[in-house]
């Protein structure tokens, strides 16, 4: 089988082990930010990097709210967005004279922030916890999780920031104001904002991003992984305004281990390259930081095949009827295995049900001898898909005595196969 470790060749191949610049002060820089506060380390780190500032009296005032304009200014510094050549965002209340004008314009042009429905941006309004969630996800290019089920009772389904809040929760960046509330409309405080911004910056370094353009594709299709315990896979858009356009994939590490990843794409015109990729994804921690590497492969795993008698369920708590032996041969009579290993089906409602593993493509006949003396034959079609890790399996039980009913009380008749004709 072919295996190829991806080397460093563009953004998609970078192992996510680069740590963010951090200059944590050994002692609090502000008299009202004692080291015992949960946000102290983040406040001192961002202040040491001149990303946030305090007041002339030497305080930081962590309990005060932060404005939308201030949040924009901090985010532009942290994400290093270009503010020299910006387009006028045309917000009614944001003129070039505003100190946050360039930051607001840069974020608006990138699609990170929006104004209100009346054409205002509200630079002096306190930014809410919900608004901050959406902005952070977009600004730091973090994965946008969908279908929220975080249990926050005060975040309505119609809330436009719901996905952003859920994404922060999934990334471990927030637990809400209680196990069941997020308080989306409350203003975020300066201390809370500092901690959330620093945590978002840190978590970004551990996430690997794949871009469709790096494969010379227009977008991704059929993105899937086989083990969600090792990493999350989130397909998203590089354009915040086109959330359903899958042009990027985020691989979010959850624990050390190896799992698999498959996806296909829409090639550019006249492309002769294959339109799928299949990888082993290796997730490790190196010096306390996540490192992700991709190993391309053409492996196909053995695939479970469930053998059971069609439409036969368990009646009146009957005991499960196990197989005594199973043989497998090709449709042209060549023996593959005279003693196939098998296990019980997971289903508790199917009689005469067992599972075998198939590790090759082809057309097969499985013969199952059951403990009660019954014998069943199954036709198995196994097809290898280059872009999957498993065979595509289709199983049909061969019924030697089948009655076809066309309506109650009427029979089309029955056809009996002669013995040995299966």
Image: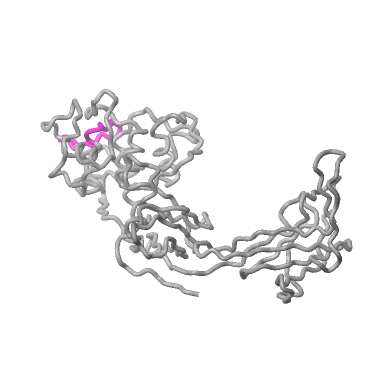
Q: Is residue 69 above or below residue 404?
A: above
Question: Does the stretch in magenta take in 226?
Answer: no
Quadrant in the picture for the C terminus: bottom right
Q: Residue at x 44, y 29 (%)?
A: 158
Q: Is residue 46 above or below residue 157?
A: below
Q: Is residue 120 left or right of residue 337?
A: left
The magenta-colored residue range is 55-70
Residue in the foreground of this view, choosing between 36 and 104:
104
Apparent side of residue 186 relative to residue 345 in the rendered image (left or right): left
Q: Is residue 39 above or below residue 181?
A: below
**Residue at the location (49% across, 36% down)?**
179
Q: Position of residue 182 (x, y in %)?
A: 43, 33
Residue 323's image quarter? bottom right
Could you tell me which residue is drawn at 81 percent across and 39 percent down?
407
Q: Position of residue 311 (x, y in %)?
A: 77, 49
Farthest top residue? 118
Q: Nearer the viewer, residue 39 or 184?
A: 184
Asked if the stretch drawn in magenta spans residue 60, the answer is yes
**Residue 334, relative to residue 227: is it above or below?**
below
Q: Main secondary structure of the magenta part?
A: loop
Q: Is residue 130 left or right of residue 375?
A: left
Give the camera-side residue of 191 and 407.
407
Q: Residue furthest front?
A: 412
Give percent across and percent down for residue 401: 85, 56
* Rendering coords of residue 151 (x, y %): 51, 35
């Amino acid at each position: 089988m072919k295996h190829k470790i991806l080397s460093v060749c563009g953004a998609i191949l970078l192992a996510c082990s680069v740590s963010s610049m951090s200059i944590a002060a050994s002692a609090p820089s502000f008299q009202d930010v004692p080291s015992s506060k949960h946000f102290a380390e983040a406040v001192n780190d961002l202040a040491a990097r001149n990303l946030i500032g305090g007041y002339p009296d030497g305080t930081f005032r962590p309990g005060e709210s932060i404005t939308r304009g201030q949040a924009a200014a901090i985010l532009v510094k942290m994400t290093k967005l270009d503010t020299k050549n910006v387009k006028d965002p045309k917000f009614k209340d944001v003129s070039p004279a505003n100190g946050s004008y360039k930051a607001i314009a840069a974020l608006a042009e990138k699609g990170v922030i929006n104004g209100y429905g009346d054409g205002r941006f509200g630079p002096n309004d306190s930014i809410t916890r919900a608004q901050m969630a959406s902005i952070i996800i977009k600004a730091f290019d973090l994965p946008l999780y969908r279908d929220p089920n975080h249990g926050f009772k005060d975040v309505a389904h119609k809330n436009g920031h719901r996905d952003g809040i859920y994404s922060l929760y999934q990334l471990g960046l927030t637990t809400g104001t209680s196990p069941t509330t997020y308080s989306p409309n409350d203003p975020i405080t300066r201390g809370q904002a500092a901690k959330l911004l620093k945590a978002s910056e840190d978590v970004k370094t551990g996430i690997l991003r794949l871009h469709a353009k790096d494969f010379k594709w227009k977008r991704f299709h059929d993105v899937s992984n086989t083990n969600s315990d090792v990493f999350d896979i989130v397909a998203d858009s590089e354009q915040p305004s086109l959330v359903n356009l899958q042009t990027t994939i985020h691989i979010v590490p959850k624990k050390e281990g190896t799992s698999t990843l498959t996806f296909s794409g829409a090639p550019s015109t006249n492309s002769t390259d294959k339109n799928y990729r299949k990888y082993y994804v290796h997730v490790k921690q190196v010096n306390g930081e996540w490192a992700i590497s991709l190993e391309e492969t053409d492996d196909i795993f053995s695939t479970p095949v469930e053998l059971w008698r069609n439409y036969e369920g368990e009646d009146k708590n009957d005991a499960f009827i196990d197989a005594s032996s199973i043989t497998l041969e090709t449709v042209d009579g060549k023996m593959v295995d005279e003693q196939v290993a098998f296990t019980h089906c997971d289903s508790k409602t199917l009689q005469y049900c067992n599972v075998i593993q198939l590790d090759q493509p082809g057309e097969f006949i499985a013969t199952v001898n059951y403990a009660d003396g019954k014998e069943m034959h199954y036709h198995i079609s196994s097809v290898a898909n280059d872009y999957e890790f498993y065979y595509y399996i289709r199983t049909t039980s061969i019924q030697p005595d089948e009655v076809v009913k066309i309506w109650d009380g009427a029979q089309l008749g029955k056809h009996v196969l002669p013995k040995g004709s299966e």
